[in-house]
Image (spheres, helix red, strand yellow):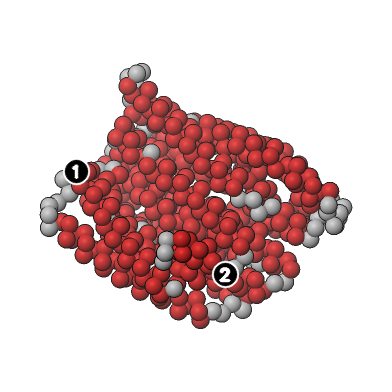
Amino acid sequence: MSSNLVKGTAILSIGLFLSKALGLLYVIPLYAMVGEENLGLYQYAYIPYNIMLSFAISGMPIAVSRYVSKYNSLGDYEAGRKLLRSSQKIMIGSGVVAFLLLFFLADPIAQIVRASDEQVFTVDDIAGVIRLVSFALIVVPFMSLTRGFFQGYQQFTPTAVSQLVEQIVRILFVLAGVYIVINFTQGSEKTAISFAVFAAFIGAVAGLAVLYFYWRREKPKMDSLLAESTVRSDIRLKDMYRELIVYIFPIVLVGLANPLFQLVDMLTFNQAMASIGLGSVSDGQLGMLNFSTHKIVMIPVMVGTAFSMAIIPIVTSYYTKGDRRGMTRSLDQVFQIIAFLTLPMITGLMILSDELYHLLFEQSETGADILRNYAPAALLFALYSVSGSILQAIDRHKWIILNLMIGLLLKLALNMPLIRMFEAEGAILATVIGYGAAVGLNIAVAVHTLHYRSRMVIHRLILIVMFNAVMGVAAWLVLKGLYLFGSVDGKGDAFLYTLITALVGAAVYAVLALRSGLAQKLFGDRLNRLMKKFGM
């Protein structure tokens, strides 16, 4: 596997992990200040925002990453710089247009979402938070484009650091703003949430400042490469964008998949719950599904997201050069590492769902059940990001569109009937069915196109599943043993039980992976050197 892919994925994984961890941890004090019901208002703002953001960005960052990587590998550094200058103007324009659209569509969206008078939030409450979050659309598309350009040079640190700084600044603004509104201005929790969503704009400005710092630092090196170009093709902007358009639409859909599935829930969940007489609790359960538990479930997904961001420019380079052996090695490693890292986290979430929900939010049987049932979907989310990115890299764009449409149609068709039968778990089941279909079809197309066969990967995946089963049994036994000493009476007990169980599970998994040699085969010489330092 390319060392650049390992290094790039490691950098993005660390940045994304820290960003996701902070994105989860700040919810704890926010939850304590505004309560569970008002967190639901928070997610009503971010789902339409994420969808509009995807349209504003229009896949340009990843497309530019791929384009720059392709022409850099051919020795033509001018093509990428020329594209950057032009696309920056486009991203500024698309950000302003997206901001105006979301700002003025806030009322119609809110009227659709509020399906019953029994719901907690009014149309004005929902429309207000959507308008405030829309300001971030002015900045984020331009920032995302700059990240994509750096990744085209296989420089992943600017993306990771800017994401982390963006998240830190946003969280500080959210918590400080909510605290001031509630404790010093005597405002309501709803007012505090409305103030908090504006933090997306403040965080984006901070992230952009970090990218500007890296641009100033790296520009001399890029200028040097530009001067030493072995090829200087005179590609017209018209031809550049004709090539980019082929990439862009499928990329938009890959990025839109999760927000679109959440949008289906946002538009149908309240209506389905009201139809079975549960309109009064629908806002709360939807908040658990699309916000609180979703944040926890997305932590394992960071691995797949990091791989999808790192794999496109590298596999594109292999594909351009016709190096199928390099592509095969990379795909082998990607699928194994995703399973190796995500499955134990999913197993842990399922076993510790009660304790984790109590620790992070409050003791809630409903919240714990949603988390336990939702956790396995994390593997599908991760695989969708990676499989979609692989199809982009090998120019199978129409299949990305078709496969996602099939998955979304299944979600749309099944969502309301399953919600009426199983409440929030029904929405999860519809998501799993829809995502499962899209992922299966993506992988089938990639396997057929690349003639990809690997018995070794199948054997390794079976081994990883077996290790997870052993780890899961060990962790479950430890947790049950802890309950012999007493039940969980507070967050302190929940933390202690979670910590002990997680440490035992991680230790068992690590011993199995190291003793079998699997970890060494996946992570190579760096892990071997690290083990020698510790006398292993």
From the top left corner, tell me how far across and down residue 476 is, in percent.
24, 63
From the top left corner, tell me how far across and down residue 273 is, in percent.
30, 49
Q: Earlier in the sequence, mark 1 or mark 2?
A: 2
Query: What residue is shown at x 40% (from left), y 75% (from top)?
Result: 516
From the top left corner, tell me how far across and down residue 401 is, in percent.
59, 61
Query: What residue is shown at x 42% (from left), y 40% (from top)?
Result: 44
Secondary structure under the numbered disc 2 in the rendered image: helix
Q: Which mark is residue 283?
A: none
Secondary structure under the numbered disc 1 in the rendered image: loop
Q: Residue furthest top?
A: 185
Q: Residue furthest left?
A: 485
Observer able to see residue 417: no
The quadrant in which residue 431 appears is: bottom left
Q: Residues within 10 Å of mark 1 (few under 14, many from 20)?
A: few
Q: Nearer the viewer, residue 140 or 158?
A: 158
Q: State the quadrant of the C terminus.
A: bottom left
From the top left corner, tell me how far across and down residue 235 is, in percent.
84, 53
Query: What residue is shown at x 69% (from left), y 67% (from top)?
Result: 318
Query: What residue is shown at x 48% (from left), y 34% (from top)?
Result: 170
Left or right: where 421 falls relative to 306: left
Q: Which mark is residue 490?
A: 1
Q: Residue furthest bottom?
A: 455
Left or right: where 469 falls relative to 61: left
Q: Which residue is mark 2?
A: 331
